[in-house]
Image (cartoon, coloured by chain):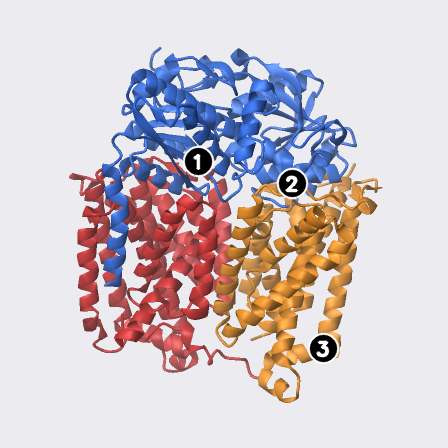
Chain colours: A blue, B red, C orange
Amino acid sequence: MRIASRLLALACLLPLAALAQGKTVKIGVLNDQSGLYTDLGGPGSVVAAKMAAEEFGNKVAGMPIEIVTADHQNKPDIASSIATKWIDVDGVDAILDVPNSGCALAVAKVVADKNKVFIDSGAATSNLTGKNCTPNTVHWTYDTWALANGTGKEVVKAGGKTWFFLTADYEFGKQLEKDTRAVVEANGGKVLGSVLHPLNASDFSSFLLQAQSSKANIIGLANAGGDTINSIKAASEFGIVAGGQKLAGLLVFLSDVHSLGLKTANGLQLTSAFYWDHDEKTRAWSKKFAAKHNGRMPTMVQAGVYAGVLHYLKAIQALKSKDDGKAVVEKMKALPTDDPLFGKGTIRADGRKIHPVYLYEVKKPSESKAPWDYYKLIREIPADQAFRPLAQGDCPLITAKK
Amino acid sequence: MTARVETEKPAAIRGRVPARGEARSLRIPTLVLIAVCVVAPFVIYPVFLMKMLCWALFACAFNLLLGYVGLLSFGHALFFGAAGYLTGHAALVWGFPFELALLTGVATSAVLGLAVGWLAIRRQGIYFAMITLALAQMFYFFCLRVPFTGGEDGIQGVPRGKLLGLISLEGNLTLYWVVLAIFLFGFFFIVRVIHSPFGQVLKAVRENEPRAVSLGYRADHYKLIAFVLSAALSGLAGGLKAIVFQLASLTDVYWTTSGEVILMVLLGGLGTVFGPIVGAVAIVCVESFLAQLGGWVTVVQGGLFVICVLAFRRGVIGELARVLRRPL
Amino acid sequence: MTTVFGVPIQALFGQLLVGLINGSFYALLSLGLAIIFGLLNIVNFAHGAFYMLGALGAWLLLEHFGVGYWPALIISPLVVGLFGALIERTMLKRIRGLDPIYGLLLTFGLALIIQGVARNYFGVSGEPYDMPPQLTGGKNLGFMFLPNYRAWVVLVSVLLCALTWFVTERTRLGSYLRAATENPLLVQAFGINVPRLITLTYGLGVGLAALAGVMAAPIYRVSPLMGSDLIIVVFAVVVIGGMGSIFGSILTGFALGVIEGLTKVYYPEASSTVVFVIMALVLMVKPTGLFGRTA
């Protein structure tokens, strides 16, 4: 009895909603809202998506725009089931963000199977435009290759010849190390050693000690989130930087630097596709964003969600329809991109969004003039050098054409 | 001082005692259950229902161990997740048909259950829980490092295959009927076990182990068998889930999954027949509705734990059973 | 240079020292849990959450009241300890007579709530907490650079462990407590207010967790998730040491730190899992832990 009434109560929610969906452009922002990646995307990404929808007055090609969101808790099965339900039942047309490579790969497959649109801004795996590419996927913002190339190449060229890696013991970390290693060696540097640490290790003193005794110029941090923060904190405590070695953060976000504080993080070099204080346009947008997001400045992931939604809506406007995911993505690739955050760029045939990336260094506390004034620009890496060349990737869409 | 034997096991943790002829009285609730399950996919999204069924089976299997044998295992995710991986791998890489892949998963969990059970059975209470936790965490580490699991990406793209080589399972509704059938099989199997002579011995062991031993029953053997059964059925649930979602991932072997199934059984009612099902349904619904609210899911889950333990120890079905004065 | 299995002996000393430092931290953290379980028979899964509250409290004191590290060392544990006592009074009391499993589940639920609320207000990346200026810097010991703060952690940990062990095992208060757990009715008959004693003890255990949190704030990030990562390890320490024994947890804490340190040198990927291997091994050989009371 109770079981029955409960189930029937649930029934109201799901299928009836599907009936109303036909004529709305529904965008789903799927990311981590309770775990490790909350601050680099999370509710901020939803704010960014809404700002993009507002640019169109919340209507495109005569259809209203609706934005929904869910928390995938960094679990691929939850991400996959939410994506499936969104498309099958709730009529979602495009899925945005999705940090965590395992989740991104799962969602990419679901979206491709059901012919909708997937614009990933949060995940790092370059496989999304490599062997796991689909005609329905666009990979915005960054990937492991861009990070490895940006930080690796520039740091070696600037004098950091010998490297030691502190790598998180999972696929993403190992991939990042592998990509960076290749770049370092190709540019005349040498890798003296590496150590794998368990994910979410709380104490890095032992690993840093090993890095210290290797006497490498650069300690490359092939990890993310809390692990990166803890590594940097411990490095500062054990006098690594004072002892002459430099830290290269291979995946560091603005939110990480904010939580570390400039005293601990200064001198850290990192690659980012977006920084709020880059120029007038990014500043203006970021201030509007911060006003809606507890005064926190946007990370590159959140910026990527804004730009991705904007371009998606432009493509729908040009096509005057939204139902065929492949067609919409093809339109997105045909139209050049232009937004205040990433400037002018394009989306390549394999789904990779191309734009310049930048090498930044974290300022010292004395150099920072205002809250969130954290980075100084070292070098810009032009768009045509920032990402893995099309020929080097193994995207089946490209190799099949050959 | 003599060893403090666990004679004063408080009433609340024990499951209820199935009496003679009780199986018959479960007929009506069972019919209601089947009726609901038959009607449901036409009103509710079938994939969502299948998720509930997989978790319900897992919860029932866990309840067999906790509610009827009295052993709290903190490592059941091991069996759930291992079967998920093996079923996924068998279907994807070895190309096994649906039934064989599922059996591979079940067999894996049964073997693991035998190993873990043999190591852990000799311990009692909290030590039993901790040893299962330790073994589960070691297994998690193993899964993290071994390449076939795909690390944190998991095994993606598990094919659903065909039933008996004839009927394609790609369609959600078709798969739902199959999953429902397998769930009901597992459910009835558990009910049968509970109401059998074997079940009676388990009850005797739980009530007063030394006495049962003195009567000639080898308590450890009975506990081990129950443990293996529980592990195998958890494996069935895990394998099913891998097929339904076409994905097997690390989260299924992490200790938080073990925690979730404990919550489901607790909320539904320890040692009741329908309790775990209700608990599983409730928790899956809470998670899915609150996914929209992002971070508040864990707070609500925590709140449920607290309320259950403080005021609601018999669980939903337990309280209902008390009010109706009939076993459920 | 001599090597031990391929690692130069100098580097090995450094790693062992680091291991010892971590061990002292584990010992400090497991102290509160050992008291709560050893004396009150409550499996306190909320211990990690209280640890986090201690660190968060220190950060809040700094951010909003400008109160620095040294006063925070006392204020934060006190406040969190009081909160713990309140929880014991209102919730744990009700399940006192029952199977310890219920205590485990209740405190697990509490941990989820505390962590979830903290996370929703403070985000997950954590907040920076600076080291007190008196303790920055360090000494170069030749084979490694020892930060002063870490040496301070060892000092505090050793002192507190010794103090706690002494109080529980050798003073009258300690013996009241131990008696009260074994036979509350009888002890109450002697005129001792047992419920209050239990509440205070829980508060004390919680306060110790919070103190460990304040000590951790400068070196690990202050984040709502900081407790959940450590809680399992701390539990393992207490279980291995034997759940009735304060001395057992202290010893195990230090030993685990050293063993983990060695693992990090020879097989670093396994360093988070080695504690479970040890726990499984110990429990199979000695069911109640190394120094546990035979039940």
Read off the chain for label 2.
A
Does A311 sit above or below residue A238?
above
Q: Where, by quadrant of the figure, is residue A39 drawn?
A: top right
**Quarter of the view holding residue A249:** top right
Inspect the image, locate mark 2, and give the three-letter code of the amino acid beneath it: Asn
Asked if residue C28 shows in the view, the reply is no
Checking the image for residue A230, the label placed there is 2
Q: In 3D space, how far apart are the residues under numbered discs 1 and 2 (Cα atoms)?
A: 23 Å
Q: Position of residue C8 (x, y in %)?
A: 74, 38
Q: Secondary structure at mark 3?
A: helix
Letter of the chain that mark 3 sits on in the rendering: C
Q: Would residue A203 appear left or right of B233 to someone viewing this image?
A: right
Label 3 packing within 10 angstroms: few (<14), some (14-19), many (20+): few
Q: Indicate the amino acid at tag 1.
A: Gly
> Of B57 and C291, which appears nearest the observer?
B57
Residue that label 3 marks: C173
Q: Viewed as shown, does residue B228 lie left or right of C286? A: left
**First in residue order: circle 1 vs circle 2:** 1
